[in-house]
Amino acid sequence: MIRDEDIEAAVAQGIIDAAQARSLRDLARSRAQRAPEPAEPGADPDDEKFRLIGGFNDVFVSIGVLLLVGALFGLASQVGFPGGFAIVALVAAWGLSEFFSRRMRLALPSIVLALMFAGAGAFVGGTFGGGLFGGEPSLLFSGIGASLAAIVHERRFGVPIDWAIAASGVVCTLSAALSLAAPDWTRDNYGLLVAVLGLLVFAIAVRVDASDPMRRTRRSDIAFWLHMLAAPMIVHAAVPLIAGDMGNINGAQSLAVLAVFALLGIVALIIDRRALLISGLAYAGIAIGYLVSQNIAEDMGLSLTLLGLAVLVLGLSAGWRSLRRTLLPLLPLGPLVQYVPPTHVTDAR
């Protein structure tokens, strides 16, 4: 692998000039961002790895970015011109991304800067778009602004979370458009709408996962963030639709919630992603807590519920690979098996 010192030596010896050296570095960074990363020895797709923090410098830089965001929006509120400062935030996020994302490739700052850039895009879209059309469709234009900003940012810097940000902008745009076109229907069927949109994002995430079954490339990180977006949309919309109002839960609802949680667990094992289970833990806790308080002792309900959830999470974590190897051969997946990650590193299709 050619190092920076080799390139500088080549320039010093007249083998290449400075412009060619810059082009060579840009090419190497671009290929490193988009090419598959070598698998670690003994790496397993079941580990569901993704890049978040490479070192404490990531945290330090991210704190600085968050302070910058707070300063910009604080000044916006004082001056009374939020659109102008949102544009400044766009420019600042882009410039910082050129250094920390494209050049230094810091994972956590890249995520924070992607959110900053998309958030500023949403703010610009909502402020100026809503102003042009009387303010009512500001949410619609915020979604469009966030999606466009995330797409542009991803094309330049290749940050995986940008896909999920763009998808969330599209979801916001579609929801706002339906709310404007059919407000009564949208209000009465909002849970169903969120569940359907969540399933669409989930389908995209599964498709991206299927393109990298061994989870060795950037596409695995993209799918991870899409699953993190889709899971709460599906769970928080579907559980109330199936089990009813969770504020006045009863025994039948508790059993229904646990049945839904078990189904989510099976789906999570099939696709080898844990986001659905994480999103459903709160509902499972409510259901278990009700059953415990009604059948054992009300004053011990919280402690026993937490204990049950702990045993469940730790048991699934310890037996995840074994459960997948046992479960998948028993399911009639048919042609869907091409979208299912292998049960072991050697089970590549």
Image: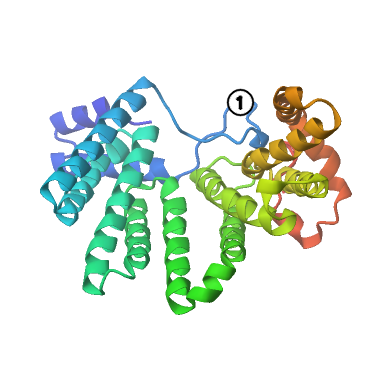
- Image mark count: 1
Asked if residue 177 lies left or right of residue 349, the reply is left
Residue at the outermost left position = 79
Label 1 packing within 10 angstroms: few (<14), some (14-19), many (20+):
few
Q: Which residue is mark 1?
A: 41
Q: Amino acid at mark 1?
A: Pro
Q: Position of residue 102 (x, y in %)?
A: 30, 41
Which secondary structure lies at badge 1?
loop
Camera-side residue of 212 and 252: 252
Residue at 37% x, 67% y: name it.
140
Q: In the picture, residue 327 is in which quadrant? A: top right
Is residue 345 at least partly visible in the picture? no
Residue at 19% x, 29% y: name it.
8
Asked if residue 54 lies left or right of residue 221, the reply is left
Q: Position of residue 60 (x, y in %)?
A: 31, 24
Q: Is residue 158 above or below residue 319?
A: below
Q: Quadrant of the N terminus?
A: top left
Q: Is residue 154 above or below residue 19?
A: below
Q: Position of residue 269 (x, y in %)?
A: 74, 43
Camera-side residue of 114 and 101: 114
Asked if residue 36 lies left or right of residue 25, the reply is right
